[in-house]
């Protein structure tokens, strides 16, 4: 399965293991578990820049838990076949050229951490609310103007990074994020944030900001 994937991307990946010190974002590698299953793939920045898009046969890696595309990759969208990776928990496709989030992407119920920041995403799909296990969502520095009401259905979400977009308002449904611990909303187009939303943000962020002051 790995051979077919490497053939599709046009270059081999280096083998590593969980006991190995993880390479930085310039490296391309894969990690296997004790049963020989590929559980993690990282495509480094140099190779990601040359890779036009992730191949459709990413779905062959059925045991994949972590996928890192270290910038420059994914010009346009993520292949819909990624939705077949039922064990995928971690996705970092930041610093790329994504302009959309495909609907099937939101069928990956195992997702816990997703970073799609620093792309060109113009719309956040309403299906995002289906990611019930998601704990961290970073979609900062994109190009969307609104969040869907379904954002409030992310019952496990602890961190939400939406700064650096063109948001005109924050939906009231965001107050349904009962597990939220930190919310970053600065550098948007909101002239005024309603008092009840502002109070919610301050209440959510207070423990985190207080802990930073305590550390100092």
Image (cartoon, grey):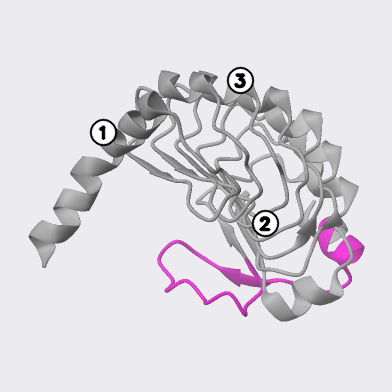
Quarter location, residue 164: bottom right
Residue drawn at the location 44% of the way across and 71% of the way down: 20
Number of other residues with Cα within 10 Å of mark 2, as a class: few under 14, some 14 to 19, many 20 or more: many
Quarter location, residue 42: bottom right
For the stretch drawn in magenta, the main secondary structure is loop
| Residue range highlighted in magenta | 5-29
Q: Which residue is mark 2?
A: 93
Assign a secondary structure to mark 2: loop
| Towards the viewer: 167 or 100 | 167
Q: How far across and how far down the image is residue 54, in percent?
A: 83, 56
Residue drawn at the location 83% of the way across and 64% of the way down: 6
Assign a secondary structure to mark 3: helix
Question: Is the Cβ of the residue at disc 2 closer than 8 Å to that at disc 1?
Answer: no
Is 152 contained in the magenta span?
A: no
Which of the two marks, 2 or 3, is nearer to us in this view?
3
Q: Which residue is mark 3?
A: 150
Quarter location, residue 65: top right
Residue drawn at the location 89% of the way across and 65% of the way down: 52
| Towards the viewer: 101 or 1 | 101
Mark 2 and mark 3 lie on one chain; the one further toward the N terminus is: 2
Q: Which residue is mark 1?
A: 203
């Amino acid at each position: 399965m790995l051979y077919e994937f490497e053939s599709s991307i046009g270059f081999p990946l280096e083998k590593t293991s969980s006991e190995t010190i993880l390479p930085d974002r310039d490296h391309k590698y894969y990690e296997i578990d004790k049963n020989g299953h590929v559980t993690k793939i990282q495509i480094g920045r140099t190779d990601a820049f040359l890779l036009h898009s992730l191949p459709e046969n990413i779905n062959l890696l059925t045991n994949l838990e972590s996928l890192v595309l270290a910038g420059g990759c994914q010009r346009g969208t993520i292949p819909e076949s990624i939705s077949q990776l039922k064990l995928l928990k971690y996705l970092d496709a930041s610093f790329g050229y994504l302009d959309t989030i495909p609907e099937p992407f939101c069928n990956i119920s195992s997702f816990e951490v997703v970073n799609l920041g620093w792309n060109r995403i113009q719309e956040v799909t309403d299906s995002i609310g289906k990611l019930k296990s998601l704990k961290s969502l970073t979609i900062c520095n994109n190009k969307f103007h609104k969040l869907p009401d379904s954002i409030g259905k992310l019952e496990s979400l602890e961190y939400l990074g939406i700064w650096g977009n063109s948001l005109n308002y924050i939906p009231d449904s965001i107050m349904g994020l009962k597990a939220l611990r930190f919310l970053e909303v600065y550098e948007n187009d909101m002239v005024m944030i309603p008092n009840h939303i502002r109070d919610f943000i301050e209440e959510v962020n207070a423990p985190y900001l207080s802990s930073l002051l305590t550390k100092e």
